[in-house]
Amino acid sequence: MSDLDPLLRERLGAYRNDVISQVAGPGPDKARQLLRRRRRMTAAAAAAAVVLGVTPVVVNAALHADRTPPVPVESVPPPTPSTSAPPTPTPTGSPTQTPTPTAPTGPNGRISRAQLLATTVDLPNWPSGMAEGGCTISDVRLKTNTKKTYVSELADNEFEYGDVDGDGADETIAIVACRYGEASAKQVVAFERNSDDRIVTVGRVVRTDDEFKDILAAEITSTGSVQVTVADIVPCCEIPDYIRREQVRTYEWNGQRFEQTDGPTKFGPDPRLTDLRVSMTHELAEVPGADTRRELTLVFTVTNAGPVDAPQVAFHNIERGERAGGDWARCKPAKLSDTDELGCLLPGVPAGESRRYTFVQLIPVQPGADASTRSFLVLHGDAQDRTWPDLKPDDNTVPSPIQF
């Protein structure tokens, strides 16, 4: 071995002693020092994990003195406090869609009364016989309050405006009439403007016919349907208003014409009326002494064939002389519809029963120049002293046996 061997051996021995001391482990003091150092490292690692928001894997590695650096998982930093209002939470479910209005496809059809009167229009057909009488339908210039017969005119009702045919533009609803006497035929008509701004007819909503006799009003609803108030009779010709019945019927445009979609379709028999039937006997007697009058006794038998009670019974055309007995003392004045003629109103007849009524009066022996043979009329009266038509009027009259 060379001269350097002693020196090399010395160095190798020192190195060996140092390695042996490391393998053998430190003494008690060194061990305590190492333990304190590890505890400080463990605490620092745990604190760093809390502050930095590291995952449990990193904390666990630090606690176990894992010398392999863990790969940190990306973490979300804590939110910065804000003084602004919290955002509005997003609602669950489908959001409500605001419908977009349909753009009008036709010109504005709002027409004033003056504009309609200033032009000519074509009208839907009138009921059978009206056109022949003079109620025209082509190039008609409408009038107002003419009081003439067979002239087409505007009724006094206010116009209605709304989209009745679904084109997005308004139309005009008006009631037109044609007089044929004291009454008038009527129809509800829809008007609009065409592309040339000319007033044209959309169609007829409804008209009077054999089923109902009068149209009182028309109104456009929010959905574009037309509600029409109709009546079964026209309150004219001495017919009182209280007898009239009314109904509201709804009509809608089906693309070609208006059709009824709601409301009653018929009036049917009037449930307020009943069927009275009358028969009569009479007796004519001379008055003793020099009296130039005779005594006439009329006995009426009234049967109520139903279906409703008649609270009172009204007799008309029976008085021509001086009242002399019988049921005259119980009479209340009975007005015949809207005329000024009065009769005798007496307690009535329940349905299915009969009652007898007697009237005695003195009449001249020789009838006057204005004497005539007349018919006696019996009508159903209600509790309000009003008289009503009969379901079968043909058996409500009997002829007088004599002229007076």
Image: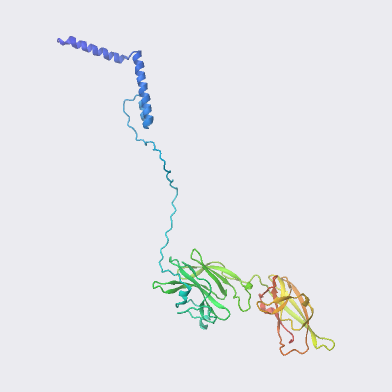
Please tell me whether residue 229 is drawn above or below residue 145 in the rendered image: above
The image's colour scheme reads: rainbow
Residue that sits furthest to the left in the current view:
2
Residue 122 pos. (x, y %): 46, 77
Query: Above or below — where is 297 with respect to 9?
Result: below
> Which quarter of the rendered picture does the N terminus lie within?
top left
Compared across the picture, whether 74 is left or right of 328 comes to left
Residue 122 seen in this snapshot:
no
Q: How many marks?
A: 0
Residue 351, given in percent of the width and then of the height, sits at 71, 70
Residue 400, image x and y in percent?
73, 84
Image side of residue 293 versus residue 170, left or right: right
Q: Nearer the viewer, residue 402 or 112?
A: 112
**In the displayed image of the protein, which residue is found farthest to the right?**
289
For image coordinates 25% across by 13% down, the residue present is 16
On the image, the x and y values in percent for residue 294 come to 80, 86
- 49, 306: nearer the viewer: 49
Q: For the view shown, which residue lies furthest in the front direction?
A: 83
**Is the residue 35 above or below the residue 130 in the image?**
above
Q: Quadrant of the C terminus?
A: bottom right
Q: Is residue 42 visible?
A: yes
Write down the quadrant of residue 13 in the picture. Answer: top left
Residue closest to the eye, 118 or 190: 118
- Residue displayed at 55% across by 68% down: 249
Query: Which quadrant of the structure image shows residue 119?
Result: bottom left
